[in-house]
Amino acid sequence: MRQQGFNRGAHILRRESGGIVPSNNSGIETFNLVAALPGRASSIHTQRAYYRWLDTYLVDLAGLKPTYADERVMRMSALSVALLQQIMSAAQLRAWLGKLAMEGHGRQGVQQARAALVTIASVLAEAGLLDDYTSAGMSNVRAPNAEDGQRPGRWLSPDELKIMMTAARRIATTDNQELRNALVMTMLCTLALRRDELSSARWGDLSIQNNRAVLMVHGKGKKTAMVDLPRPVVGLLTSWRGAIQRSRGTAASLESPLVRRLWKGGRVSRFGLTADGIWEIVGQSAVMAGIGHVAPHDLRRSVAGALHEAGTPIDKISQLLRHANVAVTERYLSRLPRVNEGGVIMSGLLGFEDDDESDEVYG
């Protein structure tokens, strides 16, 4: 018997406060993953990751165009059942995971991609939209060998982080965008926030504790942590709050998003800036700064590396990164590129002199 999470004919499903309810809308049989997935993936971060991997799967196997932000959520809320039944199989999943590994995705990424598709197949089977044999076959697919752990990524120096913060302002076309971008980049470069953590932050998460301005960060697995805010961040938050009030004619409510989208012309929207929007700000800032590709997590990694090199106790770094324990932080830091100057020292012993022109190789 088919369960909630899908609808036939002229109905698709949407989610309301009372649960999953039908909504009149023309179209073929569709499945609402947005309504069905929370029972399997309680963390909003995991749900977004699963949406991203399914979207990638649809792009690679069905030839659909990639989607982002609200457009992706809309796709996930009305997935074509016929299309899903065509592309959901053990053989296709195995081939796709192999493709991800060949493209250089790390082991953790490939394993998460597998978990996403296996979970979605199971949800479809429970709804009676996929046979149990296919679902079981997909669950037996093992992730192919890939590079251990996370990809190295970038490790930016403090000077490069400053350049990124300056570039975030320079890519803006309005005063409100400059202020918003400066706030986003400064919080990422000082608080080591994940982009999902920043996009989900609310004004009500800010408070004063023991005469200290702090932010309640909602991290992975529904974990929360208090993070002290440096004065520059407090100053930017104060200016940004004023910009919201001037733009919208009312003060920001405690439940409203901390960072928001902007309309053309710089007017502040009531909608929050998405995780993808934060990625775009970081990417455009890196291009403006002329330092190559930089991802939001590279900033988190760079904060950890800079603090470690500055001699900050590892327990303080662990607390800022909101790791479960210091051992996790030690493993995290061990993945950072290490200084290996043996060749440089040997060059000096051989009497070679530094040549400024050699820097052009990296220019």
Image (spheres, rainbow, N blue to C red):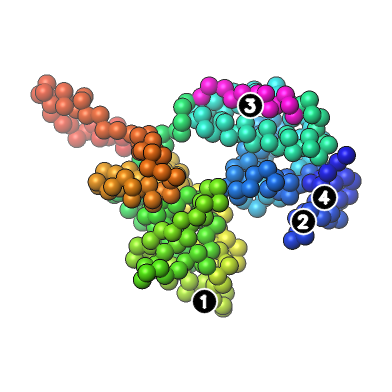
Is residue 324 left or right of 143 when viewed as pictured? left
Task: Judge whether residue 145 can be spotted in this image.
Answer: yes
* Rendered location of residue 142, percent (x, y): 61, 23
Q: Is residue 17 above or below residue 158?
A: below
Is residue 221 left or right of 324 when viewed as pictured? right
* Rendered location of residue 176, percent (x, y): 48, 67
Q: Quadrant of residue 41?
A: top right
Instruction: Give the spatial CA distance, label 3 vs label 1.
Output: 49 Å
Find the magenta span and give its range.
Answer: 135-146
Q: Earlier in the sequence, mark 2 or mark 1?
A: 2
Where is mark 4, residue-wise? 12
Q: Earlier in the sequence, mark 2 or mark 4?
A: 4
Q: Earlier in the sequence, mark 2 or mark 3?
A: 2
In terms of depth relative to the viewer, which is nearer, 190 or 226? 226
Instruction: Give the spatial CA distance, label 2 vs label 4.
Output: 14 Å
Q: Earlier in the sequence, mark 1 or mark 4?
A: 4
Q: Is residue 135 above or below residue 217?
A: above
Where is mark 2, residue-wise? 19
Q: Mark 1 is on which residue type?
A: Arg
Q: Mark 2 is on which residue type?
A: Gly
Where is mark 3, residue-wise? 96
| Residue sitting at x 67%, y 23% | 140
| Residue sitting at x 44%, y 59% | 226
**Dot 3 lies on which element?**
helix
The answer to whether the residue labelled 2 contacts the one labelled 4, judged by CB atoms less than 8 Å apart, is: no
Instruction: Give the spatial CA distance, label 1 vs label 4.
Output: 40 Å
* Rendered location of residue 92, percent (x, y): 69, 24
Q: How many marks?
A: 4
In terms of depth relative to the viewer, which is nearer, 198 or 164? 198
Q: Is residue 96 above or below residue 302?
A: above
